[in-house]
Each structure stands twice: as structure tokens, then as C-alpha cells.
Amino acid sequence: MTVLDTRALNRATLARQLLLQPADLAPRDAVAHLCGVQAQDPQEPFVGLWSRLRVFDPAELSELLTRRRVVRTHLMRRTMHLLAAEDVLSWRSRHDAMLLQRVLGVYRRELAEVDLGELAAAGREVLAEGEPHSQSELAKAIAHRWPEQSLRALGEAVVGALVPVVQLPPRGLWRTSGAARYLPVSAWLGRDVDQESPDDQVGRDLVRRYLAAFGPAATADIRAWSGLAGLPGAVKAVRDELVSFRDERGRELLDLPDAPRPDPDVPAPVRFLPAFDNAILGYDDRSRIIDDEHRGLSVAGERVVLVDGRVAGTWKVADETVNIAALHTFSRGQRAELVEQGSALALFLSDGETDRARLT
């Protein structure tokens, strides 16, 4: 079985994540290809797509949100993602058990005396009135049923697991702030989420889509990205469609036969990534893109910069300047490219008012 070293996996990841060459895709198509964009911070998806698309107007993404073609919702790993509306409708039921288990992992004691079916029904009843609610507003509206229970636990259970909801604009629009307010998926998108099929067609689709955007990858990587424990069955069902490799640790890696696996020596340009980007978080073994000693950056909300395809620094914006903090020494050419790309990012973030970048 062919062994793919770290550099080969790095270049494959960059290609699948649209980070090797700018993609000629519309924003909605890019969001769908990436299986959703991590959106814990409402403004981060704009940087993620700017780094990946040849031409990107942030107003287009805002319009997709207001036209309900993409939505913000809890899904993979129970984190907030920006997803194509069709994927939310198709994938949500497959994630229900995981979403609930993750809520209970935090609030099991607070919810021990609560009938979850009754809690879900109460949440739906309030949301059926048609008025968007924040999590705290929803919790207060149903709290009379469980006066001894934590408001936060009640709200998190309904919004984060029991009722499929979307987070509404203006939250998530370009340069627009707004409270997190929710409506049911069915009310916002006009139909209920699909029910999980007995043959787990959705699971098989998730495996194929994940590999298209993240492969080659191990089953542990798929589990780390999705938060789902049951995908090995779906992997087994599609295994005959896939090809196999090994990484340098001896793990089996699966992939789609015709997916891009570039030459490991192909140059990789500097790329600026937003906080919690799935190019890093979408793997159990993240060594293909970030050194183990810096792995903590990927879960601490640091914005990172890739040099030669790997995390090599962090970046922040202060005084209208993109400030780049290096994690190691760069060549003169790399420094010049960092400042050039950082200046382009500053220009994007400031709407053309300034293009200042500084490397420290």
C-alpha cells in the first residue's frame, strides 16, 4: 500500500481546501464543497472565503444568508457552522444523537429531572409563534415548566440539540453585529429537515463529501471533523468505491479515486486563515498542516498564517494593520510574500481604506 508522507498529505489538503490555487467558485458552491465553514465568530467565514476564492465580494455571502441559501446552525462537533441550506436539511437528523450527547455531556446533572421530549415540545411551541428568540429568551419562556432548573441548560438543550434551528441575520452579515436569535429550520427554510434513512444514505454522503474536501483521511479524522461515532458503518458501505493509502504512522487513509493528490513539491502560497478553520480542525491527526508543538493554537481561537502550506505564524488586526507574529524564521522571499498577502488582507478588511501589514 502506497505511503503518503506528511508533505504529500499537506498538498492534498491544501488542494481540497481550495488553499493551493484560488478557486473560481461562487461563495455558495465553495461553502458546499467545504462541507460548511466553521463560523463560531460571525465574521470569520468572510476571511476564510477571501483566502480561498479568486474573486470574493463579501456582499454576496451576506445576500446568501438573507436569501436563505446558506444558514448558520449548530452541526459538526456541535459548533456553529455556515452551511448550504440543502446540506442542513439533509444532514441535520444524522447529527441529532451527537448533538444531544454533547449537550448532556455538559448539563447532564442540570437536566437529570427534565423529560427531554417535553422540553423539546415546549421549545417548539414557543418558536412556533413565529417570533425569533434568543437562547435566554427561549429559556425564560419555558422556565415555568421547570422552575428549579438552570436557564442556561434549558436554552442550550433546545437550541443546541432538541429543536433544529437556524441563527438568523443580521448576525453573520458582513460588518454587522446582532444578537444570536433563532427560528426553527422548518420556518426559515420552508420545510422540515429530512428524516434519517434506514440505509444511512446520509452517512455515505457525508463520507464521500468529507473525503472530497479533506482527504486522504483516516476514519478517526472523519470522526474528529463530524463528531459522529457511527460513521464506520457508512465507511464500510462505500469502501469498494475508495482507494487506500498509509501515512507514516501506519494508519490507513481512505480517498476518492479521482480526487486531487498534487505532487508534494508543488509550491504552496502564503494563506491567511480565520479562527477555528476546518482546514486544521477537520482532522484527528493535524500534523499534516500544524506542528504538534503549536496544536494548541488551533483550539485557542488564534488566526494563523500558512507558509509553505504549514502553520507558521499568527495574525491579528490592530490600528487598521494586519500584524503577523512569526513562529519561526522566514527567508527574505517568504517575508516579502507575507507582507504582500497581509497587505491584501488589510485592504479587504478595511474596504480599501488601508493596506498596512507588519511582520514581527
Image: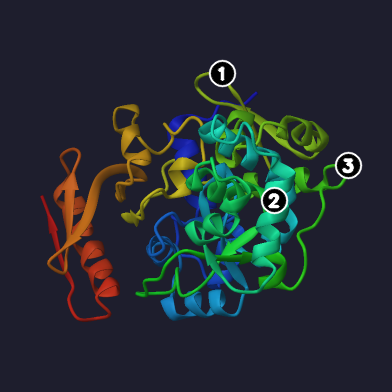
**Which quarter of the picture shows residue 97?**
top right
354 vs 234, left or right, is left
Badge 2 is on which residue?
120
> Could you tell me which residue is drawn at 64 percent across and 44 percent down?
211
For this orientation, the residue located farthest to the right is: 198
342 vs 207, left or right, is left
Question: Contact (CB < 8 A) between labels 1 and 2?
Answer: no
Q: Which mark is residue 199?
A: 3
Of mark 1 and mark 3, the one earlier in the sequence is 3
Q: Residue type at mark 3? A: Asp
> Could you tell me which residue is drawn at 82 percent across and 52 percent down?
195
Of mark 1 and mark 2, the one earlier in the sequence is 2
Q: Is residue 183 above or below residue 249?
A: below
**Which quarter of the picture shows residue 198?**
top right
> In the depicted view, which residue is nearer to us: 126 or 330?
126
Q: Residue type at mark 1? A: Gly
Q: Residues within 10 Å of mark 1 (few under 14, many from 20)?
A: few
Q: Residue type at mark 2? A: Ala
Q: Secondary structure at mark 3?
A: loop
Badge 1 is on which residue?
250
> Could you tell me which residue is drawn at 21 percent across and 56 percent down?
316
> In the depicted view, which residue is nearer to us: 17 or 122?
122
Image quarter hosting the N terminus: top right
Of mark 3 and mark 2, the one earlier in the sequence is 2
Which numbered mark, 1 or 2, is in the foreground of this view? 2
